[in-house]
Image (cartoon, grey):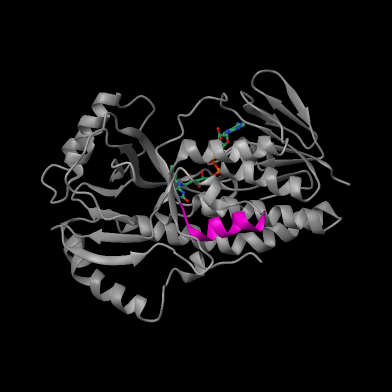
């Protein structure tokens, strides 16, 4: 009987999986590549109500875990002239008291790891997986770990994925870069509380929201055919590049970026549309390692949390490990592949030529009105319940 489970990666999927396995009666240990205090984790992440609902399945309190965040329940979309094209619900407040919440990535990781530690789940830092067999993980520092089952939660560029299937397809680049940041001084144009405002610029897409402390949290998606190379931009060069990209756009991207000490990034946008192999008898994948979704979906974190809950439940309820992993994949694969496709579609509306932009701005208000007439077309994502 599988009892001892090693989770490779201590991000969102890894920590929540370890918590789920712990509740299901297993001994779970987390092996994380970064050092304990290494907070370079990107800017912020929006966790949608379906992900928060999944946390509750583990008796975790989303309000406590995401206390450093703030609700972002609506999304205003502005066209090329700065006009409002659509105002769409992002989730909540729901009847069960949840609201889609935006939180600094470092704060979310810290809260999840604190929770794991409070439940005596060991987290070993500085353990970057090098190679993995059915029985043993070898880390770059030369140490090894054995376990009955290995859970690959090592994200987009997962080595567990490669160990499981050397022929696994590489992540697909989606034609957008990512930047993010936080203003260090006041700016004039702050959306009302709860609103994430987003605008289609001519050379890049921009999103911004006002945090309760008065700062503005923002992200940008420059359009680019090829991924950014490591070291291609200096921090100052990246900041200047973003300012230049938004020159002439009728929304306050330049003001907001200029008011920020730094522009984080660039990160490339990838997804993993369909991975043929998710599991063997001794290895299974969760989160981005199994199915990275475009950030444009706003669902990567929530999919990782849902995976964790379902995996814990399957392993906890079926005595045969192979059967439990089969059930996990059967439940999760159709949903995540649909969300990956949705994320790709959402991202592709961000980059449009001049003609495409005119068409989009003319059609989107009508299309959105039609789509929302019968209820929220994203209901299948946001209202999903695992119970
Ligand atoms: C710019 C950007 C913005 C995003 N915004 C959103 C958003 O607003 N909402 C949303 O839901 N999703 C968003 N996403 C997607 C979301 O971040 C991911 O889907 C989510 O983090 C997946 O969780 P994970 O645990 O699978 O991977 P990660 O959170 O990436 O965690 C993987 C962990 O594994 C560790 N690791 C990596 N390699 C190894 C190794 N070899 N050995 C050991 N450990 C290893 C890493 O250090 C990390 O801690 C965004 C993604 C990007 C790039």
Is 163 or 10 nearer to us in this picture? Answer: 10
Can residue 166 be seen in this snapshot? no
Q: Is residue 210 above or below residue 356?
A: above
Q: Is residue 253 above or below residue 49?
A: above
- Tell me the quarter of the image containing the C terminus: bottom right
Q: Is residue 362 above or below residue 269?
A: below
- Which residue range is magenta in the image? 47-58
Number of marks in the image?
0
Left/right of residue 47 with respect to residue 242 in the rendered view: right
Q: Residue furthest left?
A: 248
The percent position of residue 3, horizontal first and vertical second, equals 84, 43
The percent position of residue 249, horizontal first and vertical second, equals 14, 48
The percent position of residue 272, horizontal first and vertical second, equals 51, 49
Is 358 or 371 nearer to us in this picture? Answer: 371
Q: Is residue 48 magenta?
A: yes
Can residue 165 be seen in this snapshot? yes
Q: Is residue 326 magenta?
A: no
Q: Residue furthest top?
A: 142
Left/right of residue 356 with respect to residue 279 in the rendered view: left
The percent position of residue 284, horizontal first and vertical second, equals 70, 46
Q: Residue at x 75, y 34 (%)?
A: 133
Magenta-colored segment: predominant secondary structure: helix
Is 22 or 307 nearer to us in this picture? Answer: 22
Q: Residue at x 51, y 25 (%)?
A: 38
Left/right of residue 216 with respect to residue 337 in the rendered view: left
Question: Could you say which quadrant of the image residue 219 lies in?
Answer: top left
Question: Could you say which quadrant of the image residue 233 lies in?
Answer: top left
Q: Residue furthest right?
A: 1
Q: Is residue 9 above or below residue 13?
A: above
């Amino acid at each position: 009987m599988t009892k001892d489970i090693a989770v490779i990666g201590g991000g969102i999927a890894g920590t929540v999986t370890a918590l789920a396995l712990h509740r299901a009666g297993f001994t779970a240990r987390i092996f994380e590549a970064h050092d304990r205090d290494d907070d370079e984790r990107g800017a912020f992440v929006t966790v949608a109500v379906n992900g928060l609902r999944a946390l509750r399945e583990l008796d975790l309190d989303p309000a406590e875990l995401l206390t450093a965040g703030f609700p972002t329940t609506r999304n205003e979309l502005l066209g090329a002239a700065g006009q409002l094209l659509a105002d769409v619900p992002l989730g909540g407040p729901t009847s069960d008291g949840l609201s889609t919440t935006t939180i600094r990535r470092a704060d979310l990781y810290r809260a999840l790891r604190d929770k794991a530690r409070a439940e005596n789940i060991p987290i070993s830092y500085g353990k970057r997986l090098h190679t993995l067999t059915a029985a043993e993980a070898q880390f770059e520092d030369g140490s090894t770990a054995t376990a009955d089952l290995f859970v690959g939660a090592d994200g987009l560029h997962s080595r567990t994925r490669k160990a499981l299937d050397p022929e696994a397809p590489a992540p697909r680049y989606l034609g957008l870069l990512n930047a993010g940041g936080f203003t260090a001084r006041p700016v004039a144009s702050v959306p009302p509380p709860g609103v994430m405002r987003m605008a289609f610029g001519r050379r890049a897409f921009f999103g911004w929201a006002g945090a309760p402390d008065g700062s503005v949290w923002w992200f940008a998606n420059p359009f680019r055919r090829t991924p950014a190379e490591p070291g291609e931009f200096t921090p100052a060069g990246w900041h200047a590049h973003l300012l230049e990209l938004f020159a002439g756009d009728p929304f306050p991207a330049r003001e907001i970026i200029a008011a920020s000490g730094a522009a984080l990034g660039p990160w490339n946008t990838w997804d993993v549309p369909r991975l043929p192999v998710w599991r063997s008898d001794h290895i299974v994948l969760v989160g981005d390692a199994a199915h990275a979704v475009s950030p444009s979906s706003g669902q990567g974190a929530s999919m990782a949390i849902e995976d964790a809950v379902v995996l814990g439940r399957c392993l906890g309820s079926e005595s045969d490990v192979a059967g439990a992993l089969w059930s996990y994949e059967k439940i999760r694969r159709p949903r995540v592949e649909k969300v990956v496709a949705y994320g790709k579609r959402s991202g592709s509306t961000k980059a449009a030529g001049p003609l495409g932009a005119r068409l989009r701005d003319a059609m989107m208000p009508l299309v959105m009105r039609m789509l929302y007439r019968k209820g929220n077309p994203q209901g299948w994502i946001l209202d999903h319940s695992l119970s």
